[in-house]
Image (cartoon, grey):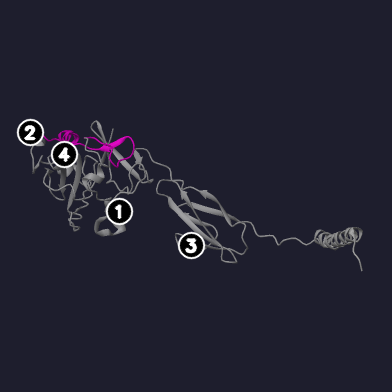
């Protein structure tokens, strides 16, 4: 059999057309089956409906949540130990919840419950609220500072007496001088105090002490107890309203001591390689002014308003 050009053209045309008609039904079949890819559930998500506390240090806060997406049913695990969808009877603070769906997908979110800030108070960067007191022309915190971050929210090193969390609310935290000053060496530096407040200077302490009855000569004395009756006025229940809490101290080698006996408070005023501090001892009627401990000791901080 002989093949010529016409035969080849015919064969190619046949193959082409045959191939075309074989492919077309497949394409048509795929387009007309009506089958769809299975739909995936929407991502698991949480919407909070918070109800803030209505009074300072109240317990009537609550949180409702709406859960969408994922595969129901859902389970709930709150940071305060509750396992219900909604929680109530809350104090001010941050609460987190882990929601898990039926196929073990989880999502974690947090919400803050706020409380009204009372008059004569100040709030720090973390939301801690401190009562304040005006003594003479000065306004002081009536509580020891307990913030654990700097004003720009960076973490700082601070201590709770004996590393027991329960001591923080009453006694505040203890800070080395450098941490309290947030790296500054200037008198009246803001340090780690709230905006509008600062670390009290040695002279501001003298002003307070002289307002309470100390003479200038007594106020200037160094490394001794001075000012009969002034320590009592600054102490817990004293007439000044300062309300020292005798939070003790932490030595630079890590030992805590003198809780419920002594109050040590840093000032922002350096004295050579040291810094001035104030000392109050429970049952002692005078107030001490010393510059003998290293700045690496951790003492309390009382901020004063600018």
Which residue sits at x=51%, y=48%? 51
Is 210 magenta? The answer is yes
- The magenta-colored residue range is 187-215
Closer to the camera in the image, 244 or 31: 31
Q: Quadrant of residue 4?
A: bottom right
**Could you tell me residue 89's position as x and y percent?**
47, 55
Q: CA distance from mark 3 to mark 1?
A: 24 Å
Q: Earlier in the sequence, mark 4 or mark 2?
A: 2
Q: Earlier in the sequence, mark 3 or mark 4?
A: 3
Q: Mark 1: which secondary structure?
A: helix
Which residue sits at x=33%, y=39%? 194
Is 209 magenta? The answer is yes
**Could you tell me residue 10's position as x and y percent?**
91, 59
Which disc is residue 270 wearing?
4
Residue ID for mark 3: 82
Closer to the camera in the image, 296 or 79: 296
Q: Earlier in the sequence, mark 1 or mark 2?
A: 1
Residue ID for mark 1: 168
* Neighbour tally class for label 4: few under 14, some 14-19, many 20 plus, Cα within 10 Å: some
């Amino acid at each position: 059999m002989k093949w010529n050009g016409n035969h080849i053209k015919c064969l190619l045309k046949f193959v082409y057309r045959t191939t075309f008609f074989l492919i077309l039904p497949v394409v048509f079949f795929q387009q007309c089956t009506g089958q769809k890819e299975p739909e995936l559930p929407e991502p698991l998500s949480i919407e909070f409906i918070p109800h803030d506390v209505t009074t300072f240090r109240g317990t009537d806060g609550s949180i409702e949540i709406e859960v969408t997406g994922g595969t129901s049913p859902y389970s709930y695990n709150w940071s305060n130990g509750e396992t219900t969808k909604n929680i109530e009877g809350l104090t001010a603070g941050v609460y987190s919840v882990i929601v898990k769906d039926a196929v073990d997908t989880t999502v974690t979110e947090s919400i803050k419950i706020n409380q009204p800030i009372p008059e004569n108070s100040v709030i720090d960067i973390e939301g801690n609220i401190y009562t304040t007191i005006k003594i003479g022309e000065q306004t002081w915190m009536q509580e020891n500072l307990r913030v654990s971050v700097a004003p720009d929210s960076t973490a700082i090193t601070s201590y709770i007496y004996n590393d027991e969390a329960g001591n923080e609310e009453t006694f505040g935290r203890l800070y080395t001088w450098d941490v309290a000053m947030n790296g500054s060496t200037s008198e009246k530096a803001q340090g780690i105090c709230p905006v509008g407040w600062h670390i009290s200077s040695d002279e501001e302490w003298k002003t307070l002490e002289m307002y309470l009855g100390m003479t200038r000569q007594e106020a200037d004395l160094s490394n001794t107890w001075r000012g009969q009756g002034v320590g009592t006025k600054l102490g817990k229940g004293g007439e000044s309203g300062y309300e020292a809490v005798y939070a003790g101290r932490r030595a630079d080698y890590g030992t805590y001591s003198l809780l419920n006996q002594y109050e040590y408070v840093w000032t922002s005023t350096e004295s050579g390689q040291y810094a001035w501090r104030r000392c109050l001892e429970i049952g002692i009627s005078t107030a001490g002014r010393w510059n003998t401990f290293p700045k690496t000791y951790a003492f309390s901080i009382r901020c004063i308003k600018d």
